[in-house]
Image (spheres, rainbow, N blue to C red):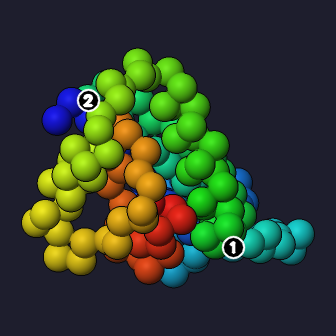
Amino acid sequence: MGLAVWTQDEAGPFQTIPFAGNSWQESGQPQRQPHEYVRDGTAKLLTLFHPHSGEVRGRGVTRSPNVVLHAWLKEELLAILARMPPQPVLERSANRELWKSWQQDLQWPITLPAELPSLRMLLVLDNLTGHKTPELV
């Protein structure tokens, strides 16, 4: 179908403290944190990956509710679409059939809105509930 394919995921949580890596201690003498040690929460990495080119886009965040994730996705995907060549304008019914064809074997197809933009990209997401909202789609 000539669609660009991107995948999205969140990595983490990661501790937000410096991590020196492996160290060696005598048996029975574990490494201890200094008394100044403060656990400073966690962070996640939002990622978009284009398997064909290997391009990765990412952003570090301290939390990733749908409000944060969807805003970042919208910003990044609009930038990606702006770089892509324009799709030919199809008749409304032909465009709807294209949208239906890519989801024909999905276990949980989405409800398509009445007005559909030209189908230009396939974004592969995990199956979190927030990723299935018509607004995000």
Is 71 situated left or right of 53 in this image?
right
Q: Characterize the local packing of mark 2: few (<14), some (14-19) or many (20 or more) Cα atoms within 10 angstroms.
A: few
Q: Is residue 111 above or below residue 49?
A: below
**Numbered-mark total:** 2
Towards the viewer: 132 or 86: 86
Q: Relative to 19, does residue 76 appear above or below in the rendering?
A: above
Q: Which mark is residue 23?
A: none
* Residue kind at label 2, given as amino acid type: His
The answer to whether 52 appears left or right of 1 in the picture is right
Q: CA distance from mark 2 to mark 1?
A: 45 Å
- Front in this rendered view, residue 28 or 11: 11
Q: Residue 49 occupies which quadrant of the picture?
A: top left
Give the residue type that dot 1 points to: Arg
**Which residue is drawn at the image coordinates 59% and 49% (left, top)?**
74
Q: Residue at x 42, y 62 (%)?
A: 114
Q: Nearer the viewer, residue 9 or 96?
A: 96
Instruction: Give SS at disc 2.
Output: loop
- Would you name the residue on which mark 2 appears? 52
Identified at 57% across, 76% down, the residue is: 29
Please indicate whether residue 103 sits to the left or right of residue 24 in the image.
Answer: left
Where does residue 20 sit, x and y in percent of width and height? Answer: 62, 51
Q: Give the quarter of the figure containing the N terminus.
A: top left
Q: Which residue is at 49% across, 48% downward?
A: 47
Give the image quarter of residue 31: bottom right
* Residue 35 drawn at (x, y percent): 86, 74
